[in-house]
Image: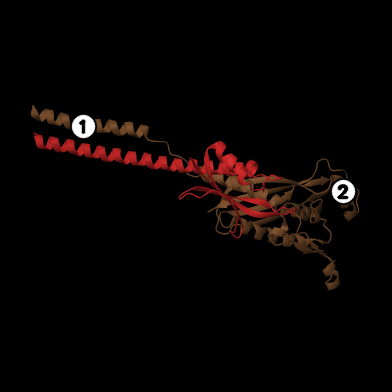
Amino acid sequence: MALTIGEDVFSALVVSLLLSIFIISLIHTWCAQGERLKSIEEFTSAVRVAEQLRDQVLAGSFPGLLEPSSGRLDNFARSRQLNLYVKVRDLSGTTIFSYGQAPEHPTTVSLPAALAMGDGSAKPCELLVGVWRR
Amino acid sequence: MATMRGISSISDMLVFSLLISTAATFLFPMPFDPTTGNTRYAASYSHSLLLALRNTTAAQLGGFRYNLGAFGLDIPSVWSSAVKDLRYKTVAELLAEDALLNMKAEFAGKNMSPLRLNEDMDKKLRLFLKSALDETIGGRFGYRLIARTTPLDLGLIRLSFETTVENLEGWSRQFWLETTNIPLPVSTQSLVSVTENMLGLELPELEAEPFIEVTLELWSR
């Protein structure tokens, strides 16, 4: 069967088009996966920071007991070169302690904790932590 | 000649695109587990919750009080002075007290527990815990909290305690499990002595210090 120049060029165009579609979809998949991995990494990092705040930075006299302090949070954020947003609120949602300004789309983590009340009692609360790099 | 060149070009292009596709497939990123972040969070959440239960006092959760048993008699004057108010105790301390007051004694597999004067405490504590956990967890996870002592063998007598609080309606898969130990607020000698008085038997010493194992299961949909 004889092939014309036109059919040859057409075949080349079809193959190029198929290849282009394939490469574009591959790039799109890589980008989407990169975004997902990045958001998981940010979330895991926020969980790690929240645990450090609970166990060390804001720790009171017993493990899991919180004594919030803006000064200690300042030092922590500076030493880790992080932007930090911390909120402690009771189970009804009332804010008891707040530090930093929440950005528009922060990665935040919420952990249950107990807040030292100063009279020997401890109140159940929620520790909300938002973290993003400077 | 032109015909052969044309067919050869198409073949080359098809082989080329096949090679590119194969190469790209090898370079395609390995799939990742999307639940990695959630598992990490569940681990941290359950650990935090158990720590919070060890520290939170009952007063901050609405208080906790129960009626001491009076051999099943309904005497208002007795009841009014037999109310125990434990608002100053932490949730962990309440669990420990519940274990001590509601320990089950078995002799050769048969339940020997005398009149359970503190059943009211056990019942009210379970309601108290359920309310506290529902409010704290707030629908993020389903949960099951189990508090149990390891069985304490005293010769022919076996002491044990177990209580469970859960909210699993609509939750189908156990996602994470965390355990912590709470010491009982009495020494082994006192525990053996109290059991001897209760059952009227002489019992051997306990070798290990008894404790309560508190397990928190978190469930996902």
- Label 2: which residue? B190
- Residue B196's disc number: none
Label 2: element kind = helix
Q: What subunit carries mark 2? A: B
Residue nearest the viewer, comparing B70 with B110: B70
Q: Quadrant of residue A73?
A: top right
- Label 1: which residue? B13
Disc 1 packing (10 Å; few <14; some 14–19; many ≥20) = some
User: Drawn colour of chain A?
Assistant: red
Q: Earlier in the sequence, mark 1 or mark 2?
A: 1
Indicate which label's residue lies in the foreground, 1 or 2: 2
Labels 1 & 2 near each other (Cβ < 8 A): no
Residue B75 visible, this angle: no
Disc 2 packing (10 Å; few <14; some 14–19; many ≥20) = few
Q: Residue at x 85, y 49 (%)?
A: B191
Which quadrant, please, contains the N terminus of chain B? top left
User: Drawn colour of chain B?
Assistant: brown
Position of residue B172 measured from the top left corner of the image (x, y, whole percent): 55, 54
Residue B165 visible, this angle: yes
Q: Position of B15 compared to A26: left or right? A: left
Residue nearest the viewer, comparing A79 with B200: A79
- Name the residue type under label 1: Met
Position of residue B140 measured from the top left corner of the image (x, y, whole percent): 56, 54
Q: Position of A6 compared to A26: left or right? A: left
